[in-house]
């Protein structure tokens, strides 16, 4: 699941010797981790949207709704996709996501499409109950893997940020260096 770029960033030795590398490299690593985290966040939102659609189909079936056409599913998409918009927390998008289009990891999107692309989702109303449950399981597993990678990147970002703060506090770096 991890692309080569993510694998490098979450490798155990990525932070080795952190207190000895130049401050520019610390900043560069932090920026790269942040950019990849934003990309993973975007992919995770895509996974969650698809999972919401599949879970809505499962709910429809459990409630005995007999409307099994694609039109009904599409008609309900605004409600389905807005049900889980408000998560705990401040609800702000990452400044990196707001500032520009995220650099999305195409390999991860391809993996997601292999699990459930739009063609597969469009056939959902006619899919067997077993296939729907299997899809839920695969999407949940995919989401957990992406979340795990995001968590590892957050740990790297925090460590890099802590190193920057340490250098400023100790006098090894000055605020003037930011202006250069």
Image (cartoon, rainbow, N blue to C red):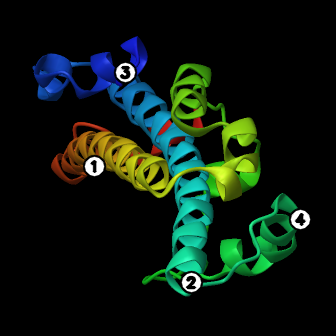
Q: Is residue 12 left or right of residue 36?
A: left
Residue at image mark 2: 86
Residue 100 position in % (x across, y down): 76, 44
Rounded to the nearest angstrom, the CA distance separating label 4 from label 3 is 52 Å
Task: Depth check: give the residue in front, 118 or 127.
Answer: 127
Of labels 3 and 2, the one closer to you: 2
- Looking at the image, residue 34 sits to the left or right of residue 118; the answer is left
Q: CA distance from mark 4 to mark 2?
A: 26 Å
Q: Residue beneath label 3, please?
A: 25
Query: Which residue is located at x 75 percent, y 37 percent?
Result: 119
Q: Residues within 10 Å of mark 1 (few under 14, many from 20)?
A: some
Which residue is the extreme one toward the top? 4
Q: Position of residue 178 (x, y in %)?
A: 51, 40
Locate residue 149: give its quadrant.
Answer: top left
Residue at left offset 33%, top offset 29%: 26
Which is nearer the N-term, disc 2 or disc 1? 2
The residue identified by callout 4 is 71
In the picture provided, is 80 more to the left or to the right than 180?
right
């Amino acid at each position: 699941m991890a692309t080569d770029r993510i694998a490098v960033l979450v490798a155990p030795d990525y932070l080795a010797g952190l207190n000895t590398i130049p401050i520019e490299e610390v900043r560069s690593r932090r920026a790269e981790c942040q950019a990849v985290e934003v990309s993973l966040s975007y992919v995770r939102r895509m996974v969650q949207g698809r999972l919401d659609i599949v879970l809505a189909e499962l709910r429809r079936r459990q409630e005995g709704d007999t409307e099994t056409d694609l039109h009904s599913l599409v008609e309900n998409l605004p409600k389905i996709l807005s049900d889980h918009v408000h998560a705990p927390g401040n609800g702000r998008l990452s400044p990196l996501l707001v500032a520009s289009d995220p650099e999305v990891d195409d390999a991860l999107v391809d993996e997601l499409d292999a699990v459930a692309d739009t063609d597969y989702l469009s056939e959902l109303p006619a899919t067997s109950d077993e296939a729907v449950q299997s899809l839920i399981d695969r999407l949940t597993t995919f989401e957990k893997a992406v979340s795990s990678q995001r968590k590892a990147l957050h740990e790297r970002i925090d460590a890099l940020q802590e190193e920057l703060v340490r250098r400023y506090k100790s006098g090894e770096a000055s605020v003037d260096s930011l202006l250069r």
